[in-house]
Image (spheres, helix red, strand yellow):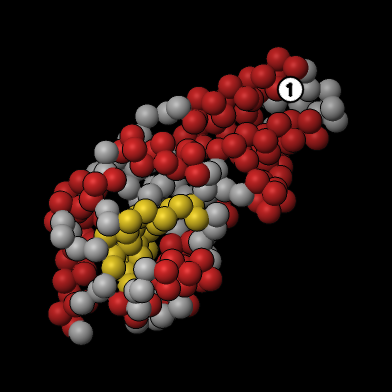
Amino acid sequence: MFEAIALDADDTLWENETFFRATEADFAALLSEHADPDLVNARLVATEMRNLSRYGFGIKGFMLSMVQTAIELTEGRIDGNSIGRIIEMGQDMLSHPVHLLEGVEQVLATLEGRHLLLITKGDLIDQERKIAASGLAGHFAGVEILADKTPASYASVLARRAIAPERFLMAGNSMKSDVMPVIRIGGTGVFIPHDLTWSLEHAEPQQDESYHELAAIAQLPVLIDELEGRS
């Protein structure tokens, strides 16, 4: 039996990357007089990568990276109104309604009574807002909002909650953040791909008996039953 079953939040329980992509398109359109969309997007991703250690994950860091990219691409010629529009884009994202993914509520109802954890990463205030707006908080025995998802951060969560890694299952849409770090500390990782996943969250799967992939979250309860029956 698993002592704890954990789920990711963004793009596992509710839509997230969709709103980033839409904002990226608006940002590219804003800078269309200075560069083509592919170059704008490439420069934005590169800026985000450089800024992760400063701002971490989340919309606020994304907004600051858009401002920096706009300044660099225009060699400082970007006007104040355009900077204001970029800030508005970020603020719109921070107030966007939460849209649950198909099957999520049914899965949580099926797993009722299990020790469920919600483990996400990013900006604390924004993640707390989305969790509250989702209406799903009552399904979880605990919520962890991490700065990043690494083997060390998962190990710290499990140690604090007295959960054995080999009795821990984590499911999510990011191979890099939700699956591989958990497998590396001895847990079970379940990859549930989303049609849109940020390029920085991609990683090659480790062909391991602790790795599993599902087409949809609706299949998760069946997989858990199979794995627990096997043990």
Outermost residue to the top: 81
The furthest residue to the bottom:
231
Name the residue at 37% across, 53% down: 143
Q: As displayed, is residue 64 above or below residue 78?
A: below
What crowding class fits label 1: few (fewer than 14 Cα within 10 Å), some (14-19), or many (20 or more)? few
Give 42 or 87, whichever is nearer the viewer: 87
Tell which of 108 and 31 is nearer to you: 108
Q: Position of residue 88 (x, y in %)?
A: 58, 22
Residue 204 visible in the snapshot: no
Residue 28 appears in the picture as rendered:
yes
Using residue 229 as the reference point, say whether residue 38 is left or right of it.
right
Residue type at the position of mark 1: Glu
Looking at the picture, how far across and down is residue 61, in whole percent? 62, 41
Task: Please give the name of the residue rendered at 79% of the width and 30% of the height, measured from the top-left corner.
Answer: 71
Q: Quadrant of residue 179?
A: bottom left
Up-down relation of residue 108 to residue 66 (above or below): below
State the count of labels.
1
Q: Does residue 4 appear to the left or right of 119 in the view shown?
A: left
* Pointer 1 residue: 33
Q: Quadrant of the N terminus?
A: bottom left
Report the side of 52 relative to 180 (left or right). Answer: right
Residue drawn 27% across and 38% down? 135
Q: Which residue corresponds to the image point at 62% horizontal and 28% vertical from the top-left?
A: 27
Q: Secondary structure at mark 1?
A: loop
Quadrant in which the C terminus is drawn: bottom left
Vertical arrangement, residue 7 with respect to residue 70, above or below:
below
User: Is residue 177 rendered to the left or right of residue 70?
Assistant: left
Q: Position of residue 199 (x, y in %)?
A: 55, 52
